[in-house]
């Protein structure tokens, strides 16, 4: 089985596995890493954890994707307290987000990338690119770098 790049299709595939068991589940966070350790391009982010919560945030459902296939959905009875319970946008696949990141002058290798719903004070979902020296926040709707945190 071939490995898919993160985007609407892969997000939809995860949802097709989770929704029949948990119809009120909302996809709130996708966490990606590379089997190579660090990734220089979107295609190298090949391991994903798709996180869902039920509509009232009282439990978390997650499913993992690696080597071209999905794991079984797992449920944890603990509340989702990180971000707003809003469906993730699907208009910007990872390869486009990488393109925006590179065009903004950030060419670091990526340790982890997270597509997450907005925190309560934020307006939009974001891609969070974690490198060895900084964390770069990219607006998942418009593609602008909205914040950079340098590691000390």
Image (spheres, rainbow, N blue to C red):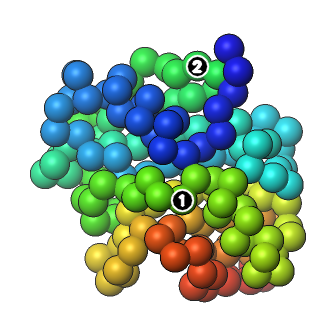
Residue 142 versus residue 97 in the image, above or below: below
Left or right: where does residue 63 sit relative to residue 135? Answer: left
Circle 2 Cα neighbour tier, 10 Å, few/some/many (<14 / 14–19 / ≥20): few
Q: Nearer the viewer, mark 2 or mark 1?
A: 1
Residue drawn at the location 43% of the way across and 18% of the way down: 72
Marking on residue 114: none
User: Do we see residue 143 in this rendering?
Assistant: yes
Residue highlighted by disc 1: 92
The residue located at (58%, 53%) in the rendering is 93
Query: Which residue reaches farthest left?
Result: 56
Q: Where's residue 125, x and y in %?
A: 42, 68
Q: Position of residue 143 (x, y in %)?
A: 58, 74
Please state, as top left, top right, bottom left or bottom right, where the C terminus lies in the image: bottom right
Task: Count the labels in the image.
Answer: 2
Horizontal arrangement in the rendering, residue 51 relative to residue 75 (left or right): right
- Is the residue marked by circle 1 packed among few (<14), some (14-19), or many (20+) residues within 10 Å? some
Residue 48 location, quadrant: top right
Q: Residue furthest top?
A: 1
Q: Give the SS element for disc 1.
A: loop
Residue at 63%, 81% (x, y): give it.
Answer: 145
Camera-nearest residue between 77 and 120: 120
Q: Identify the element where label 2 is drawn.
A: strand
Residue 59 versus residue 85: which sits nearer the camera?
85
Considering only order in the chain, which callout, 1 or 2, is on the residue closer to the N terminus? 2
Mark 2 touching mark 1, by CB under 8 A?
no
Can see residue 59?
no
Estimate the x, y position of residue 91 in percent, counting from the top left: 47, 58
147 up-or-down from 109: above or below: below
Q: Which residue is mark 2?
A: 69
Q: What percent of the width, then of the height, locates residue 1? A: 68, 14
Q: Residue at x 74, y 65 (%)?
A: 99
Work out how far the residue at label 2 is from the one at label 1, CA to CA, in angstroms.
Answer: 22 Å
């Amino acid at each position: 089985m071939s490995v898919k790049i993160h985007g609407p299709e892969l997000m939809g595939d995860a949802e097709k596995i989770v929704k029949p068991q948990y119809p009120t589940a909302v996809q709130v966070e996708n966490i990606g890493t590379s089997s190579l350790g660090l990734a220089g391009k979107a295609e190298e982010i090949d391991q994903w954890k798709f996180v869902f919560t039920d509509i009232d945030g009282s439990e978390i459902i997650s499913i993992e994707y690696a080597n071209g296939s999905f794991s079984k959905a797992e449920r944890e009875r603990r509340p989702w307290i990180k971000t707003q319970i809003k469906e993730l946008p699907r208009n910007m696949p990872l390869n486009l987000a990488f393109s925006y990141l590179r065009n903004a002058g950030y060419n670091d290798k990526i340790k982890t990338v997270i597509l997450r719903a907005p925190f309560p004070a934020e307006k939009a979902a974001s891609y969070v690119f974690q490198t060895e020296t900084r964390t770069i926040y990219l607006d998942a709707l418009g593609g602008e770098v909205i914040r950079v945190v340098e590691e000390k």
